[in-house]
């Protein structure tokens, strides 16, 4: 366990040192969120609020989503893992007394947590300072605590999906195709483009059960107040379920794959 | 103790001709070529030995090392390192070994070297006292004190390589695999690394498997050499034996003033410059003393040196002999 904590630590240190990246990302995310919120404002005004979410819930959803976007992102952020398979430095990882699944999973978590740790406070502050209907609203201590718990689970599910995706690199030399499909699927079905309550009813009911909803959708809907009580408990139960299933699947796939691994580049 | 028995490993490589049309064609059907990286390889290495593992590029050296490290699973054959099958008991096996891939880095690029070392300490669960002791010793021997606080990306290649070689020794491995540890280093760094490797072997009894293209590494370090080519072990013996096997010729270089001497039977001209002559001599036809006496009678000798043919030449001759 200590080795994983230590790996997590060094990955965090590694990620914490890029100030310009952090600033740039806060700025772009802020502009993006503002744009999205204005678009939703227009939609709500023309169609008197017959959606599954109110406008102010949607605004909170978007602010939190943009604040934690790097944490909920399945596809990007693990360049070192990709590079290690591509150029063969994976040889070193395999020569360590550590399970490669645990190693990668730990790195995936740290890669997402470290930029979020720098970005989230200033971004939240900006969102809280906005004028009334566009603002990020604070839902109370209990809901926030539930949101944090659900976010941790979401991070786990994101990591588990990311590792599964990285395992495909052992089979396909270039990961571009997998990434393009992965980006579309993980973002769309997780409510990354449109929150799930905006989906057509029947379709939305199915999408909520998929592992992708267990990533960003669940914590964001809990925070914005559109997922409460038994529904919230059920959604978090699904998060635990998917985390267990995906991690077990990844662990199995990894051990199968390593028997036929080829190290690139001599 | 390392035992390698009848190990085979093949790769399948997609091949295509150059050009756009062929690239498009290869989207639909591909031709594969099977490469026998290791073809029935067997050898045995005793504890505390230093082995030089040589062969031209693509001969199968790195594949052998990766099988011994448990990274690659061979197609067939058995291998035991310290009594364990590397690829089956990978996690417990790698605790007893250390490895340096000279062409890659194991240090975290953007953080100080010492952070990488501490991560290794936790990964290998090295006892704190042992870690301190080994770190102090390595710092002293490899002169690392200035380097430890520097991020790996800011180190020169020579500095980084010193850190790379220190890293796998922190956990006191029984066997260490060095895959081209002196690649790209300047003369001073090479000598420092060689001395260090020798010292670790003598003091700790660490078994060392060294693959390299630098014959001076081989000369300075190893008693026994394994030559591999086309995935097969071609020769196994000491450097002396290899030299005997190839040629017993001597190189004689003379400097002289006056008339240029002529060469006689048993000599072969290698190089002739103003007032300097290098020949190779077959001592079975003409003894060395007679050759020198012959030169002395023809001209005035200023300097004479007699050497065995160089290791480079031995290896080049071997590669040629085995068509590898």
Image (cartoon, rainbow, N blue to C red):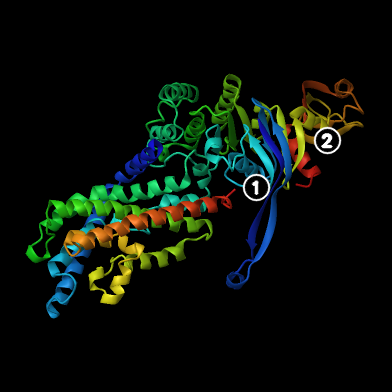
Q: Residue furthest left?
A: A132
Relative height, residue B185 to residue A200 (above, below): above
Percent from the top left, x then y, of residue B61? 66, 42
Determine the residue positioned at 34% across, 63% down: A212
Percent from the top left, x then y, of residue B301? 80, 21
Q: Nearer the viewer, residue B136 or A107?
A: A107
Count all numbered tags in the image, as a single digit. Answer: 2
- Local SS, label 1: loop
Q: Nearer the viewer, residue A27 or B80?
A: B80
Q: Residue furthest bottom?
A: A46
Q: Quick check: marks 1 and 2 in contact, CB under 8 Å? A: no
Same chain, marks 1 and 2?
A: yes
Q: Which residue is mark 2?
A: B269
Q: Which residue is mark 1?
A: B74
The answer for which chain carries disc 2 is: B
Q: Quadrant of residue B145?
A: top left
On the question of residue B274 being in view, the answer is no
Position of the N terminus of chain A, as image quadrant, is: top left
Q: Residues within 10 Å of mark 2 (few under 14, many from 20)?
A: some
Left or right for A239, reference B45: left
Relative height, residue A250 to residue B192 (above, below): below
Left or right for B140, reference B18: left
């Amino acid at each position: 366990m200590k080795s994983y904590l230590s790996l997590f630590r060094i990955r965090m240190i590694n990620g914490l040192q890029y100030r310009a990246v952090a600033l740039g990302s806060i700025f772009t995310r802020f502009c993006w969120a503002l744009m999205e919120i204005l678009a939703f404002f227009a939609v709500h005004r023309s169609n008197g609020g017959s959606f599954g979410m109110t406008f102010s819930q949607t605004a909170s959803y978007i602010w939190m989503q943009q604040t934690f976007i790097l944490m909920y992102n399945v596809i990007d952020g693990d360049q070192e893992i990709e590079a290690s398979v591509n150029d063969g430095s994976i040889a070193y990882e395999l020569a360590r007394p550590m399970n490669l699944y645990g190693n990668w999973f730990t790195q995936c978590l740290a890669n997402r947590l470290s930029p979020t740790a720098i970005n989230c406070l200033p971004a939240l502050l900006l969102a809280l300072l906005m004028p009334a209907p566009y603002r990020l609203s604070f839902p109370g201590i209990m809901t926030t605590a539930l949101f944090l718990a659900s976010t941790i689970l979401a991070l786990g599910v994101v990591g588990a999906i990311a590792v599964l995706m990285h395992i495909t690199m052992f089979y396909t030399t270039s990961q571009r195709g997998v990434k393009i499909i992965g980006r579309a699927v993980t973002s769309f079905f997780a409510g990354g483009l449109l929150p799930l309550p905006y989906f057509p009813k029947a379709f939305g009911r199915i999408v909520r059960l998929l592992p992708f909803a267990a990533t960003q959708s669940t914590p964001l809907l809990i925070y914005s107040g559109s997922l409460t009580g038994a529904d919230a408990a059920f959604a978090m139960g699904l998060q635990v379920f998917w985390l267990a299933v995906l991690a077990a699947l990844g662990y199995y796939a990894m051990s199968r794959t390593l028997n036929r691994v080829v190290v690139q580049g001599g | 103790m390392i035992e390698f028995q009848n190990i085979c490993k093949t790769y399948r490589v997609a091949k295509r001709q150059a050009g756009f049309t062929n690239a498009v064609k290869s989207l639909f059907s591909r031709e594969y070529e099977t490469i026998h990286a290791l073809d029935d390889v067997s050898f045995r290495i005793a504890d505390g030995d230093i082995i030089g593992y040589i062969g031209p590029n693509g001969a199968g050296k790195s594949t052998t090392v990766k099988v011994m490290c448990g990274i690659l699973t061979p197609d067939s054959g058995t291998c035991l390192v310290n009594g364990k099958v590397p690829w089956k008991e990978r996690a417990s096996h790698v605790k007893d070994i250390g490895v340096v891939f000279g062409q890659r880095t194991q240090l975290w690029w953007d953080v100080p070297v010492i952070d990488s070392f501490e991560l290794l300490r936790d990964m290998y669960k090295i006892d704190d006292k042992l870690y301190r002791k080994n770190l102090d010793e390595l710092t002293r021997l490899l002169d690392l004190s200035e380097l430890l606080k520097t991020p790996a990306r800011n180190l020169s290649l020579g500095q980084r390589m010193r850190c790379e070689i220190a890293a796998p020794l922190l956990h006191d491995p029984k066997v260490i695999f060095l895959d081209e540890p002196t690649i790209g280093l300047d003369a001073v760094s090479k000598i420092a690394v060689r001395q260090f490797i020798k010292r670790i072997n003598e003091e700790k009894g660490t078994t060392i498997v060294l693959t390299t293209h630098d014959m001076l590494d081989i000369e300075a370090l190893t008693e026994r050499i394994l030559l591999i080519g086309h995935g097969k072990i071609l020769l196994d013996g000491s450097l002396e034996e290899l030299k005997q096997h190839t040629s017993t010729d001597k190189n004689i270089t003379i400097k002289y003033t006056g008339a240029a001497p002529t060469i006689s039977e048993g000599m072969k001209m290698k190089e002739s410059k103003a007032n300097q002559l290098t020949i190779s001599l077959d001592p079975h036809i003409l003894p060395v003393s007679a050759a020198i006496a012959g030169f002395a009678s023809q001209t005035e000798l200023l300097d004479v040196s007699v050497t065995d043919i160089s290791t480079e030449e031995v290896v080049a001759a071997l590669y040629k002999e085995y068509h590898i």
